[in-house]
Image (cartoon, rainbow, N blue to C red):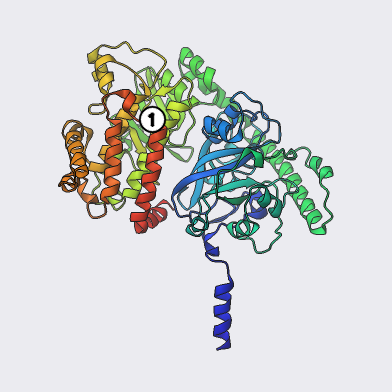
Amino acid sequence: MNQLLLSLLFFFCIPPNLDAQQSYSGNKVMDCDNSDSTGPSSAFLYTCNGKNQSCQAFLIYKSQPPYNTISSISNLLSSDPLELARINNFSRSAVIPTGKEVIVPVLCSCSGQYYQANTSYTIPSIYDSYFTIANYTYEGLATCDSLKRENNYSEFSLDIGMKLQVPLRCACPTRNQTENGTKYLLSYLVSWGDEVRNISERFNASIKSVIYANRFTEDDPTIFPFTTILIPLSNEPSSSQTIIQYSLPPPSSPFTPFNRIERSSTGFHRMIIIGISLLVLSSILSMVLLLYKKKIFGAQKDGKEKKKVALPEEFLHDVAEVDQGLKIYKFEELRVATKDFSIQSRLSCSVYHGVIGGQVVAIKMTSKDVSNEVILLRKINHFNLIRLYAACEHQGVFYLIYEFMENGSLRDWLCKKDCLEVQSWNFRIQIALDVANGLHYLHNFTDPTCVHKRICSNNVLLNRHLRAKIANFSLAHSAKEEEYMNSSMRLAFGEKGYMAPEYIEYGLVTPEIDVYAFGVVLLELVTGKEAVFIQDEKETQLSEAIISIMEEDDGEAELGGLIDPCLMAKHSMKIVLQLVKLSLACLEEDPESRPSMAEIVSSLLKIQVDVQKSEPYLWRGVQNFNV
């Protein structure tokens, strides 16, 4: 009886949903050889355990040259520069003081078992390693282990010009936190001398909520530089809550900031000694690895330099102006990779899969000039846009080597009616959101504004986690340039069923033609039908069905008849109606009446929340599938 009472007392005394909070990583992030084979590890990223799959989140980044302007920080962290300037009360042209905390708004999403905000980084120096990129460039907002997991390059093969995918540490509130008034989680970058109590007070968060959020077991826990803790917020963070921090210790001089810290605690001094030792050891190890890398791979670099003569001089000149790091392969290497371009290696009439350096890639062959496509793809930088790895030229034929997308095109995927994932709204909404985010980046974060022009379900590719990426940039176009094509040429280059009326009639190229095509793709996700069956017949029926629903007639049954049959057992009419309305808004004949991609992303995020409520069991399946 006494044992039972003790058990009940323990049960009621532990904080509610404590197991649902995130674990603080501690100094594990300084080790690049952690494993999560037995379960999620805080040394990688924060675990997907929140109420929502995606959410608005915030990061703290400390300004440091060359990342000390709105544009440079927004590019590094893939954040909206307008929002970045607004929330920090900076002008777009301001140079931010070194060490100044910058609030960075990001979209935080589940990918597999972890939350992450996606960005990418092009390596500028041979001295970069996963450790230095995670801890010095990204100041601990990335981790060495997650970088190694996300990229297929070994520590010794990193080289100038390589583009790395960088998952950033973020999280969404749990159900318990939401019920207690938490709207956002801020990933706070710990600096020398920081204490949980002081940080909590600065961001108007209760120390109890911060302790629970990070699963601390004591009221005054020890926290380490280069790590992050989560701060629960009931409102957006404010620039008035940020300060100028002491500079992070550079690899060559880890002792610099300590003479400014005054604290008598023996435990604190022990923590500093441990931190110094780790930094010195890491710096020495990095230098040893780099020297070893130069010694072992130096001869190979000479060979790589010779490969660059394989492409025409004018092509190489154009590419070199943008990116010196594009790999150039010999044709023989591609023959070996594709087993001499065998039928077994063929993905489509002009695309093959192959293995180069242990990495599976997609190889596209074309006789057209690819200079513009290569230059564009090496400029753009977004998780939802296909990655270009390398190129080759042989006897007038160009070969472009891309990342391999295991699940093929969206069009092919939608035809797999007996596939469990195809039957779920969760996956379809996430795919729509991925495409919308990719287009949002093209329309708002490229200079000049880029228009894809060929958005369709065949040009949306899906990776092994069913995350979507936009491909085929052969006709991508600057919205600032005028289009002078006759009607027959426009029809030849366009995708049947996806072309906006103003492009067909006048050849007008604006971001709105991508919005129109996206509306058709969204209808494909709802109906499961191809665009050629949608645009004339379905659009009219959907419009009439919506009018009938508004007039409380039999429109709901009519609308239900247009939904992909494999979704019928799981669909919510509210969700369907929201998606169809958004689709038809994108298909407005007047370009100016269509929503922007930013508005579309916002609408889809709200729809996604409703889907997760209606399909909680399938959402758990999504998480398990992504693992």
Residue found at the very far bottom of the displayed protein: 1
Residue found at the very far front of the displayed protein: 551
Q: Is residue 453 visible?
A: no
Up-down: is 304 above or below 169? above
Up-down: is 462 above or below 622? above
Task: Give how far across and how far down residue 296 sits, in percent.
Answer: 64, 36
Q: Is residue 55 visible?
A: yes
The residue depicted at 23 percent of the width and 28 percent of the height is: 497
Neighbourhood count class around disc 1 (C-alpha, 10 Å): few under 14, some 14–19, many 20 upward: some
Please state which amino acid type lies under the numbered disc 1: Ser
Task: Give how far across and how far down residue 60 sits, in percent.
Answer: 62, 41
**Looking at the image, which is closer to me, 121 or 406?**
121
Q: Quadrant of residue 156?
A: top right
Looking at the image, residue 91 sits to the left or right of residue 419; the answer is right
**Looking at the image, which is closer to me, 113 or 257?**
257
Task: Give how far across and how far down residue 437 sits, in percent.
Answer: 42, 35
Task: Give how far across and how far down residue 618 sits, in percent.
Answer: 34, 56
Looking at the image, residue 538 sits to the left or right of residue 180; the answer is left
In the picture, which quadrant includes the N terminus?
bottom right
Looking at the image, residue 268 sits to the left or right of residue 36; the answer is right
Q: Quadrant of residue 428?
A: top left
The residue depicted at 31 percent of the width and 49 percent of the height is: 425
Q: Which residue is mark 1?
A: 596
- Count of all numbered marks drawn on residues in the image: 1
Q: Quadrant of residue 458?
A: top left
Looking at the image, residue 553 sits to the left or right of residue 356; the answer is left
The residue depicted at 59 percent of the width and 72 percent of the height is: 13
Q: Give SS at disc 1.
A: loop
